[in-house]
Image (cartoon, rainbow, N blue to C red):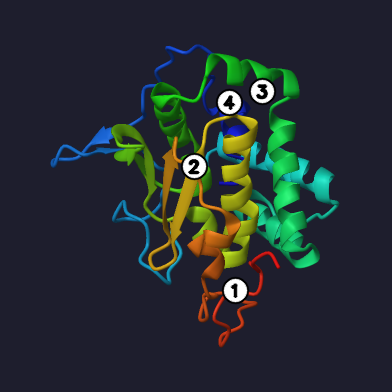
Amino acid sequence: MLLQLEALRGGATRIPFASHLELKQPRRHRPDGVNMVRCRMAEPSGKPAPMGKKTHYKDSWLDNTILSICMRRLGNVTGVSTTKKGYDGFVELTRKVMETRSPLLQRASSMRVLHSAIPPWLLKIIRRFLPNNQKTAETFAAATLYAEWLVGPCEVKEVEVNGTMQKSGVLIKKCRYLESSNCVGMCVNLCKIPTQDFFTNSLGVPLTMTPNFEDMSCEMIYGQTPPSIEEDPALQQPCFATLCPTARKKALTCSKTPLPP
């Protein structure tokens, strides 16, 4: 999730840094008792569009303001620009980053933007007052729900981490960034790997993101150490042959996510 921390810092919610922190999840109740996050989708069904079709959203002024901040910071880091506004502009900007940089430089660019959102002194405070434990993992999972403008509708789920059941998982029903870009490489290099790296190594709380390229959903598990690049199935995923504008249809894996030599 590229720039998730920017969403939290940009006004969607304020997080006091205390080890006993609990975030209340914005939610509505369905008849079956499942708590669902409120999402600004403009779909009549209230659900993400099916695979192959784009879900429509109605972004608020705050969403667009945060997007503008994200785009400006990404532009400052990479030197790329676009005349498009809103979420389409955000996707266009990141696509230009993908087209002009190697996978390693794409990941580095995303990491620089994430670090620009939280200064070093604040990172130290976060690591001190939010240590790597179950409570912190569940706190980050709850906080992720406030980034629905970026990733689409999602909900906290119970997962097993190191033999313990805890509510530190997040299920993104259909990732907005993935369905807007239709690009495996952009998902992996500009979102998944740098976000995992940022939480695991900079914030000190392991994060594993597992995108499902069959339906564009994604599972995030805070507290779970991500696999190595060499063993990560996401880097062995082929292109979206009928969706990605730069797809190599006969390639076994996406050319934009090469494994290390």
Q: Earlier in the sequence, mark 1 or mark 2?
A: 2
Work out how far the residue at label 3 is from the one at label 1, CA to CA, in angstroms: 34 Å
> Could you tell me which residue is drawn at 58 percent across and 25 percent down?
11
Count the numbered circles shown.
4
Q: Earlier in the sequence, mark 3 or mark 1?
A: 3
The three-letter code of the residue at mark 2 reads: Thr
Q: Closer to the camera: disc 1 or disc 2?
A: 2
Q: Earlier in the sequence, mark 2 or mark 4?
A: 4
Work out how far the residue at label 2 is from the one at label 4, CA to CA, in angstroms: 29 Å
Residue 50: horizontal and vertical position, in percent?
Answer: 35, 66
Q: Residues within 10 Å of mark 1 (few under 14, many from 20)?
A: many
The three-letter code of the residue at mark 4 reads: Gly
Residue 159: horizontal and vertical position, in percent?
Answer: 31, 40
- Residue beneath disc 3: 123
Please name whichever residue, 67 or 202, is drawn nearer the observer in this view of the structure: 202
Q: Earlier in the sequence, mark 1 or mark 4?
A: 4
Q: Earlier in the sequence, mark 3 or mark 4?
A: 4
> Could you tell me which residue is drawn at 63 percent across and 15 percent down?
125
The three-letter code of the residue at mark 1 reads: Cys
Q: Closer to the camera: disc 2 or disc 4?
A: 2
The disc label shown at residue 254, or none = 1
- Residue beneath disc 4: 11
